[in-house]
Image (cartoon, helix red, strand yellow):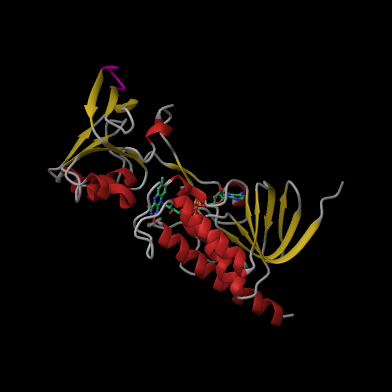
């Protein structure tokens, strides 16, 4: 049976902080808006038990914050559709077609706010210690380890940058890298190696996390000799890459070498009427505030695009 075809003004892909913010603004500008989410509404911040850097909230949980944003988007008139999987997309200057399990959408403009998924440690106990010693955002949780010894896993650009940044709180930072040399730019590596608070352990991988309620110890293994070492640490920050969910856009939209969407500060991609907002956009800082900012910019620019489209006919 042919799927129902739905025409609308704006389709937003992803109901995280960027997508919901875009939905709030677009709906307030009277744009007929649908936010499509294939998992739980809220995005990656749902994993955060404590958010202390989102203005207006001294301390909240990711789930609470996103529930409020969700309600706010719907109150303004945006529709939010959960658990409908996108099967294919066509995104050109003239045609925008998104086919899901249930519908064929034909929006006039699209905001891709698909975020990203951080790679987690492939250990069964990782879930137990998530936010209880295992963290993925140094800007968000670094302050919890004032004066303490901590560990950073990952010797790429993100891990090296985080290790340097975390020395403002921690008394000592152990940087664990599975290879024989770090993979960040030379200038940043020099800064790291000159920092007396940081010690780099090369050719090491994390094999076990231990602790009662919270992380207490990490067992490391030398990838060459298989010798194991147990280190007492209450906190570990993991930077072993991320998995962008952008493959389906690649035939139409430029992606950077990490798979993020190339779009300027106006959030406009090279395809007319297609915008990228939040963590999915190629950029340096990925936080709630920057996601919300992108959502705002993308929605206002999408509304302008739609208005111009109307008057150009
Ligand atoms: C554990 C953790 C703690 C953090 N703590 C903080 C903090 O304290 N403060 C802070 O500022 N930042 C924090 N961050 C970072 C912050 O969560 C992100 O920067 C922000 O959530 C990005 O929002 P987003 O909307 O761009 O992306 P996301 O939150 O990733 O949302 C994208 C949404 O799009 C959906 N999606 C993707 N593809 C599709 C598709 N094809 N169809 C339908 N839906 C799709 C996803 O399911 C997801 O719900 C934390 C991140 C993590 C992982």
Query: Which one is nearer the viewer's eye here, 216 or 31?
Result: 216
**In the depicted structure, whether residue 306 falls above or below residue 276:** below
Query: Which one is nearer the viewer's eye here, 265 or 255?
Result: 265
Q: Position of residue 20 (x, y in %)?
A: 55, 61
Q: Position of residue 248 (x, y in %)?
A: 62, 48
15 falls in the magenta region: no
**In the depicted structure, whether residue 87 falls above or below residue 67:** above
Given the current orientation, which residue lies at the most extreme right position? 1
Q: Is most of the magenta stretch helix, strand or loop?
A: loop
Residues shaded magenta:
222-227
Residue 192, by quadrant, is top left
Query: Which one is nearer the viewer's eye here, 161 or 91?
Result: 161
Q: Classify the position of the C terminus by image quarter.
A: bottom right
Q: Position of residue 183 (x, y in %)?
A: 31, 41
Task: Tell me: 43 left or right of 74.
Answer: left
**In the depicted structure, whether residue 207 falls above or below residue 6:** above
Q: Position of residue 221 (x, y in %)?
A: 29, 22
Q: Is residue 175 visible?
A: yes
């Amino acid at each position: 049976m042919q799927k129902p075809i739905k025409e609308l003004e704006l389709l937003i892909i992803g109901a995280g902080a960027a997508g919901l913010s875009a939905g709030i603004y677009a709906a307030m500008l009277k744009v007929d808006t649908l936010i499509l989410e294939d998992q739980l509404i809220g995005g990656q911040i749902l994993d955060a038990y404590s958010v202390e850097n989102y203005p207006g909230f001294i301390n909240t949980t990711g789930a609470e914050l996103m529930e409020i944003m969700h309600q706010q988007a719907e109150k303004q008139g945006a529709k939010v559709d959960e658990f409908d999987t996108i099967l294919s997309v066509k995104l050109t200057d003239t045609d925008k077609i998104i086919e899901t399990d249930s519908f064929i959408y034909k929006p006039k403009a699209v905001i891709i706010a698909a975020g990203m998924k951080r790679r987690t440690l492939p250990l069964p106990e990782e879930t137990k210690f998530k936010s209880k010693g295992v963290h993925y955002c140094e800007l968000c949780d670094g302050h919890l380890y004032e004066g303490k010894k901590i560990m950073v896993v990952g010797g790429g650009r993100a891990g090296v940058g985080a290790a340097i940044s975390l020395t403002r709180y921690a008394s000592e930072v152990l940087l664990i890298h599975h290879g024989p040399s770090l993979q960040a730019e030379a200038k940043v590596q020099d800064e790291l190696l000159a920092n007396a608070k940081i010690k780099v352990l090369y050719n090491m991988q994390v094999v076990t996390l231990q602790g009662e309620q919270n992380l207490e110890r990490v067992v490391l293994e030398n990838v060459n000799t298989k010798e194991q070492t147990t280190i007492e640490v209450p906190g570990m920050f993991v930077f072993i890459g991320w998995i962008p969910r952008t493959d389906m856009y690649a035939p139409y939209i430029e992606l950077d070498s990490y798979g993020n969407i190339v779009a300027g500060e106006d959030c406009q991609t090279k395809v007319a009427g297609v915008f990228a907002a939040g963590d999915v956009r190629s950029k340096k800082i990925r936080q709630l505030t920057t996601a919300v900012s992108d959502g705002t910019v993308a929605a206002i620019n999408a509304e302008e695009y739609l208005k111009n489209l109307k008057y150009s006919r």
